[in-house]
Amino acid sequence: MKNGPTPRLPDFIIIGAAKAATTWIVHQLQQHPDVFLPSPEPHYFSTEYERGDSWYARWFADATTGQIVGEKSADYLAHPLAARRMRSLLPSVRLVVQLRNPVERAYSDYCMLFRRGTVGAPPEKYLLKSAERPRFLEDGLYHRHLLRFLDIFPRESLAFILHEDIRREPEDVIGRISNHLGLAPRIATAEVSARVNDSEAPLLPLALRRLLAPMKPIAAPLRRQPWFQSVHSALARRPDYPPLTSELRRRLRDFYATDIEMLGPLVGRDVSGWLNVEDAR
């Protein structure tokens, strides 16, 4: 990243929630010529704050004149200090919040780490008051987390998107976010239904992934080669995730019930469907 003549800082930030399709929003906004938004997550206001404002500004040094600047770090919503740190540096920043049924979010987060081999089975070990992985439960307490932002940011600074909005009306979501950011909507029809971070994408067996991990930098330039893709396709398999049982779903629903009931009036959306224990994944 090169240094520009004038440091740029974000005009908008996508703050989460994690595993709520925030990467989809990034992918759509990156198609807009008037937006500069890096793909990696800086995590500045959460885990990288000690690096300082100059380090943060370098993430946006390649933005061109006329572009608005943004970033996405999906852990900001649940981080206890992110809101105040953000308000101190960026008092006029526009925020985009995407929320997903917290039961589904917790299970999706578990599946991501299961896919990586950092957690095992059964999911109950991690999703029921796990001291080892508190993020699985805590990150889904949206009402609690949003109060930190709404206490110090004007309500009109925040746009709320539900995960199901993307499934039902993706073009409308793009339009609403564009309007919130002061952009002319740009609908890239071929991109609207694109899926990113697909949890069902085939993977190499975990043992083989670990064996090959030191060779990642060497393999990266080869990924687009037909022969490489053929070998990968021959060896890769779809992940076989431990299931989210009805009983586990019910217990998670009960954990989130009070927060969900308070969330709807706070964001002006009907989220009562999240209390349906039989909601399909």
Image (spheres, rainbow, N blue to C red):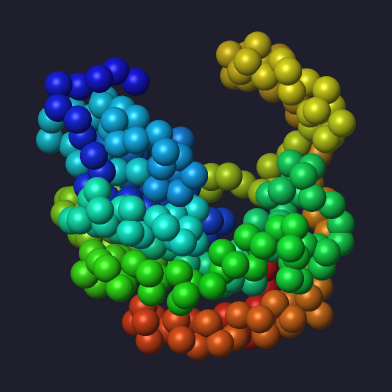
Left or right of residue 136: residue 180: left
Counting from the top left corner in percent of width and height, residue 15 is at: 40, 55
**Residue at left 65%, top 56%?**
109
Quadrant for the N terminus, please: top left
- 44 or 207: nearer the eye? 44
Left or right of residue 240: residue 102: left
Question: Hey, which residue is sitting farthest front in the picture?
Answer: 50
**Residue at left 40%, top 55%?**
82
Counting from the top left corner in percent of width and height, residue 79 is at: 48, 58
Left or right of residue 121: residue 3: left
The image quadrant of residue 98 is bottom left
**Rendered position, 19 above or below 238:** below
**Rendered position, 116 above or below 222:** below
Residue 272 visible to an observer of this rendering? no
**Rendered position, 135 above or below 50:** below
- 215 or 125: nearer the eye? 125
Counting from the top left corner in percent of width and height, residue 196 is at: 53, 45
- 206 or 152: nearer the eye? 152
The image quadrant of residue 54 is top left
Quadrant for the C terminus, please: bottom right
Residue 54 visible to an observer of this rendering? yes
Counting from the top left corner in percent of width and height, residue 167 is at: 49, 64
How many circles with numbers are drawn on the protein? 0
**Residue at left 23%, top 39%?**
9
**Residue at left 73%, top 76%?**
249
